[in-house]
Image (tube, rainbow, N blue to C red):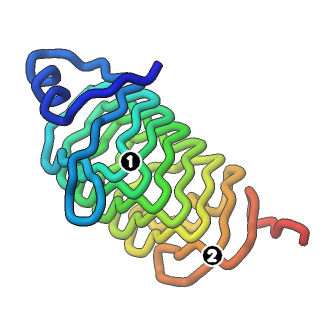
Amino acid sequence: MAWEITTEELLKRYTSGKRNFAGAVVIRERGYGRNYIDLKGAVLRDINLRGADFSFADLRGADLTGADLFSTSLIEARLDNAIIRDANLECVNLYQCNLTNADLTGTVLTYMNAVDAIFRGAQLTPFEHAILIGADFRGATPALHDMICRGMNVIWDTIMFDGTIEHGPYFGEWKPISK
């Protein structure tokens, strides 16, 4: 069930010990030309944000270690330099999300929608069943082609670790989709 909360109220409740914010729709504040959620540098370890809407959130440098972000909407969110270790990002929507230099070590990324997502320099864990159309993995580690081009992932115009582009479309184990 969706319910609304402001960033100030979320941080206040989190600081007082509450961790369950499943289904929350964070009320966006007026910014320069676009509404945004300002949680830059926030420490939100072990928070439950299952099904929450954090689209356009500024979470640069945030610590989301152990967070449950199952099915969370992070459309156009900024997660540059965020620490998201041992978290659950299964079924997450990362459309146009910026995860430059994010630490995703040990994080579940299965079934993620990473269309136009930026993972430059990110530390990754293997994942499967992801949509990687236009995603950018330049400089990400570990730099394993098989980590991306396997496991039923959809690969199309995806920028690989070394800057080469896999035009595809490919589905799964390097098998082109019939046109």
Numbered marks: total: 2
Q: Which residue is mark 1?
A: 55
Q: Residue 103's spot in the image, x, y percent?
A: 30, 52
- Vertical relation: 97 (above or below) 14: below
Residue at image location 39% in from the left, 58% down from the top: 76
Local SS, label 2: loop
The amino acid type found where label 1 is placed reads: Ser
Q: Residue 146's spot in the image, x, y percent?
A: 61, 62
Sort mark 1 into few (<14), some (14-19) or many (20+) by Cα contacts within 10 Å.
Answer: many
Q: Residue 74's spot in the image, x, y percent?
A: 41, 47
Sort mark 2 into few (<14), some (14-19) or many (20+) by Cα contacts within 10 Å.
Answer: some
Residue at image location 90% in from the left, 68% down from the top: 178
Local SS, label 1: loop
Q: Earlier in the sequence, mark 2 or mark 1?
A: 1
Residue at image location 56% in from the left, 58% down from the top: 147
Q: Which residue is mark 2?
A: 157
Would you say the residues marked 2 and 1 are in contact, meaning their CB atoms lie under 8 Å apart? no
Where, quadrant-wise, is the C terminus in this rendering? bottom right
Q: Nearer the viewer, residue 89 or 56?
A: 56
The amino acid type found where label 2 is placed reads: Asp
Say which quarter of the image contains residue 141. bottom left
Residue at image location 46% in from the left, 30% down from the top: 51
Between circles 2 and 1, the one closer to the viewer is 1
